[in-house]
Image: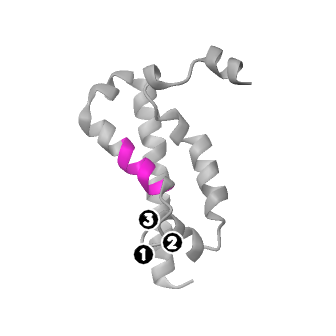
Amino acid sequence: MEPETNLWIAVLAQAVRDAKTLVKRVQEKPELWGNPLFRYEVRHLKQFFRSQSLAVGSFRFICDLMSVDPDQAAQCIEEKYLRHLVPANERPTQTASLQAA
């Protein structure tokens, strides 16, 4: 594997670790939602994983470089991490979810 590929894999691995860390931090301290810096970190991370950009360094660029389906990878990251990064007062209620079904 080329050194550049290893670099981009490391970038993606760090982004996933960051997502995992943010989820853990907010689960331990829900009051972090009141911190603008924390909310900025969450917003920035979500934008990285949800972006449709193919620019150098983007999530889709790295997935393409690794021959990974970016939609499938994004769905996995969404389910495992990003869906947990929503303040409790903005989460859909279970009743609303059941009514939609």
Q: Which residue is drawn at 36% across and 50% down?
A: 44
- Magenta region: 42-49
Q: Are marks 2 and 1 in contact (CB under 8 Å)?
A: yes
The quarter holding residue 67 reads bottom right
Residue at the extreme bottom of the image, as rendered: 2
Q: Which amino acid does label 2 sit on?
A: Phe
Q: Is mark 3 on a helix, strand or loop?
A: helix
Q: In percent of the image, x 48 and y 62: which residue is there?
A: 12
| Circles 2, 3 touching at the beta carbon (< 8 Å) | no
What residue is shown with label 3? 11
Q: In the displayed image of the protein, which residue is found farthest to the left?
A: 36
Tell me the kind of residue under disc 1.
Val
The crowding category of the residue bearing disc 3, from other C-alpha atoms within 10 Å (few below 14, some 14 to 19, many at least 20), is some
Dominant secondary-structure state across the stretch colored magenta: helix
Q: 7 left or right of 80? A: left
Label 2, on which residue? 61
x then y, percent, for residue 20? 49, 43
Marks 2, 3: nearer the viewer: 2
Q: What residue type is labelled 3?
A: Val
Q: Indicate the quadrant where residue 22 lies.
A: top left
First in residue order: circle 2 vs circle 1: 1
In the orientation shown, which residue stands out farthest toward the front?
100
Which residue position is annotated with label 1?
A: 56
CA separation, marks 2 and 1?
6 Å
Q: Residues within 10 Å of mark 1 (few under 14, many from 20)?
A: few
